[in-house]
Image: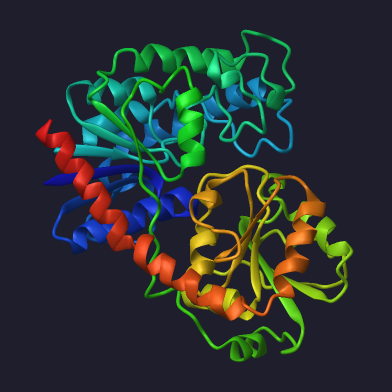
């Protein structure tokens, strides 16, 4: 069986998840290939666009991107700060991608933004089998990756609030209608959707674009041999944290992302004077509470595991999210989690067993849960329960086996 994965890169949340799955499938003896837009390393089974394209194709890929980016910038000029990304289905130069792909039993799509040209790619896939893992909401919106409460994607977008637009025929409506025309030409049994969480699956079922395609929920997997429990006191010494104080940790790729909820966490901690906040990620936060210990962006999984282990609790205060990898990573390291109830965490956490859920965008609710859990005598018991659950249900082997079962089901249909 050959599986070809398509994704913009193997870095970032979605790309990292795609790369981990690809590597686990190869360990299982599956002929898994990764075709990515950007990849710095030479790695067996991974082909970057620059490696696959001729020099002429590379030139067109770069040159066509310039006016496209300028026009997109004009169309999204009034984009609100909370709209982290706004991606459209056209990618001039991306029409070369299908010409470079080998034949495969199944093409597995991941993060396609600014990588694939939808009209070209889905025309290529029309007579082939494809799986699409949805890592955010962009595949079924007019451009945003998370809607911040807007439900216009259930109809046809337009007058996009994240673009501060009052124009019904704005770029979000045009992109939405282009996706609609493309997906209408895809056979329902030619494209199989996968959501890593029930939260995102519910959004898909509301979508007028993708609700009629087959949909499965397959949780992300993580490397439980890398994210392991470490001695808490030793890890605190590593990060210069006093052994006796209560510590919570917040990790995100970009700490300035309002959607990830760091500002809300700061609000919650303002009235709890005896807790240190450990942070890791790009864009160091302003220490509004005088107790923030920022550790920079941590690339190493081993170092990140030690950061989780140094904390009593991990906090995931996302305003909305799919299935944050930080949730499973911290639990795999034996650190209980307090997470927003507006993300995939509700698929994983049983309150009082693995941590707790709080009401999204409610600092008082988060503060209450932090005070409750940091005073509990059962944190060590929770720690063991977290580790056991991730090993049993959220390892890479479990995830890869679920995808392999789906692939076999699709090919036998």
> Is residue 42 found left or right of 245 in the rendered image?
left
Frontmost residue, 238 versus 195 = 195
Residue displayed at 56% across by 35% down: 145
> Is residue 264 found left or right of 212 in the rendered image?
right
Which percent across, then down, holds residue 300? 49, 73
Image vertical order of residue 80 relative to residue 376, above or below: above
Note whether residue 29 is visible: yes
Location of the C terminus (image quadrant):
top left
Frontmost residue, 304 versus 69 = 304
Residue displayed at 55% across by 26% down: 143
Which percent across, then down, holds residue 117? 38, 26
> Is residue 194 found left or right of 151 in the rendered image?
left
Which percent across, then down, holds residue 250? 66, 64
Residue displayed at 45% across by 77% down: 228
What color scheme is it? rainbow
Which percent across, then down, holds residue 7? 37, 43
């Amino acid at each position: 069986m050959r599986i070809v994965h398509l994704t913009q890169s193997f870095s970032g949340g979605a790309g990292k998840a795609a790369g981990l799955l690809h590597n686990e499938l190869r360990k299982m003896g599956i002929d898994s290939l990764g075709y990515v837009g950007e990849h710095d390393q030479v790695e067996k089974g991974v082909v970057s666009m620059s490696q696959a394209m001729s020099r002429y194709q590379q030139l067109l890929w770069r040159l066509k991107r310039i006016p496209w980016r300028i026009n997109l910038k004009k169309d999204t000029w009034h984009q609100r700060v909370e709209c982290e990304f706004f991606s459209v289905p056209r990618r001039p130069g991306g029409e070369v991608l299908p010409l470079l792909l080998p034949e495969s039993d199944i093409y597995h799509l991941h993060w396609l933004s600014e990588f694939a040209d939808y009209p070209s790619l889905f025309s290529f896939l029309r007579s082939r089998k494809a799986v699409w893992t949805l890592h955010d909401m962009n595949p079924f919106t007019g451009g945003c990756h998370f809607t911040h409460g807007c439900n216009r994607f259930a109809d046809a977008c337009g007058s996009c609030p994240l673009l501060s637009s009052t124009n019904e025929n704005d770029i979000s409506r045009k992109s939405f209608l282009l996706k609609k025309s493309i997906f209408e030409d895809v056979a329902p049994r030619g494209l199989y959707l996968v959501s890593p969480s029930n939260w995102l699956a519910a959004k898909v079922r509301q979508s007028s674009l993708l609700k009629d395609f087959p949909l499965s929920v397959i949780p992300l997997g993580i490397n439980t041999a890398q994210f392991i429990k470490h001695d808490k006191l030793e890890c605190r010494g590593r990060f210069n944290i006093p052994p006796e104080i209560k510590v919570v940790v917040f990790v995100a790729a970009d700490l300035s992302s309002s959607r990830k909820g760091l500002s809300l966490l700061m609000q919650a901690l303002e009235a709890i004077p005896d807790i240190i906040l450990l942070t890791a990620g790009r864009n160091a936060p302003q220490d509004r509470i005088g107790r923030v210990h920022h550790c920079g962006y941590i690339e190493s999984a081993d170092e990140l595991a030690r950061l989780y282990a140094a904390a009593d609790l991990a906090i995931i205060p996302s305003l909305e999210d799919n299935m944050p990898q930080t949730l499973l990573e911290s639990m795999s390291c034996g650190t209980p989690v307090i997470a927003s109830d507006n993300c995939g965490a509700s698929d994983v956490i049983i309150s009082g067993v693995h941590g707790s859920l709080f009401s999204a965008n409610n600092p008082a609710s988060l503060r209450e849960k932090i005070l409750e859990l940091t005073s509990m005598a059962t944190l060590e018991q929770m720690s063991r329960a977290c580790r056991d659950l991730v090993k049993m249900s959220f390892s890479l082997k479990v995830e890869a086996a679920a995808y392999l079962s789906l692939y076999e089901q699709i090919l036998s249909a």
